[in-house]
Image (tube, helix red, strand yellow):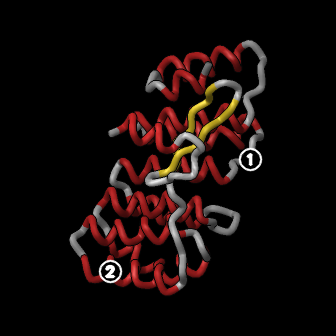
Amino acid sequence: MIAGYAHHGHVDEAIHHFKEMVDRGVRPDAVTFLALLSACRHSGLVEQGEEIFHSMRKHFNVLPEIDHYACMIDLYGRDNQLGKVVGFMKMIPTELGAAIWGVFLNACRINGNTIFAREVEEKLLGNIGDDGARYVQLANVYAAEGNWHDMGRIRKKMRGKEVKKLAGCSWVHMENGVHTFTSGDTSHSKAKEIYKCLA
């Protein structure tokens, strides 16, 4: 219920149900806190998010996981607090993986700040290996600023490493089966009929 309220932007209801849950003696877990942080993130409630994040360990003995850290980075990024993002990332006790770097790049893009992105570019590209999505994100950070030279440079690096972004796909559940589709895909058994219908 908390996650449902959070997902639909009803932060007050999510927090109300969280308090009711605690009052009834039901112990919140990592998933509960992730839902609450997501609610704060989508509603821009920075102080409330910070309070919830710090209460995890302090009051409930729940250790933050990588998704909780990512939520906080996104929360600060959406609130144009890129300095806080950088400081917060230094406090993360585990190695920064692709998920954290992805949220960081999004924060850089939102804030139109290529300085931080450029500072971590080498480390970032060294850590993400073949994760083409991060290359695309980094290129988009530069493109958002109108820096076409650096955008082209990142795209060139991506091609040089033969890194590809995974194509997005859609799927439909029909007649006890799942049918997946990607753009331009003709491998489906009814591709001709599907494209005829689309035309």
Bin the neighbour count of mark 2 within 10 Å (Cα to Cα): few under 14, some 14-19, many 20 and up. some
Q: Secondary structure at mark 1?
A: loop
Disc 2 versus disc 1: distance between alpha carbons? 41 Å
Bin the neighbour count of mark 1 within 10 Å (Cα to Cα): few under 14, some 14-19, many 20 and up. some
Left or right of 191 in this view: 35: right
Q: Position of residue 179 (x, y in %)?
A: 61, 38
Q: Secondary structure at mark 2?
A: helix
Q: On screen, 123 above or below 49?
A: below
Q: On screen, 185 above or below 46?
A: below
Q: Amino acid at mark 2?
A: Gly
Q: On screen, 41 above or below 101?
A: above
Q: Image point 53% across, 65% down: which residue?
A: 101
The residue closer to the viewer here, 12 or 57, is 12
Q: Position of residue 155 (x, y in %)?
A: 40, 78
Q: Which residue position is annotated with label 1?
A: 63
Quadrant of the image containing the N terminus = top right
Q: Image point 51% across, 52% down: which residue?
A: 186
Q: Amino acid at mark 1?
A: Leu
Left or right of 142 in this view: 65: right
Image quadrant assignment for residue 47: top left
Quadrant of the image containing the C terminus = top left
Extreme-bottom residue of the structure: 160
Q: Image point 58% across, 59% down: which residue?
A: 99
Labels 2 and 1 touching (C-beta < 8 A): no
Res 173 label: none
Q: Position of residue 165 (x, y in %)?
A: 51, 65
Q: Which residue position is annotated with label 2?
A: 152
Left or right of 109 in this view: 60: right
Q: Position of residue 38 (x, y in %)?
A: 53, 37
The residue closer to the viewer here, 134 or 85, is 134
- Badge 2 or badge 1: first in the primary sequence: 1
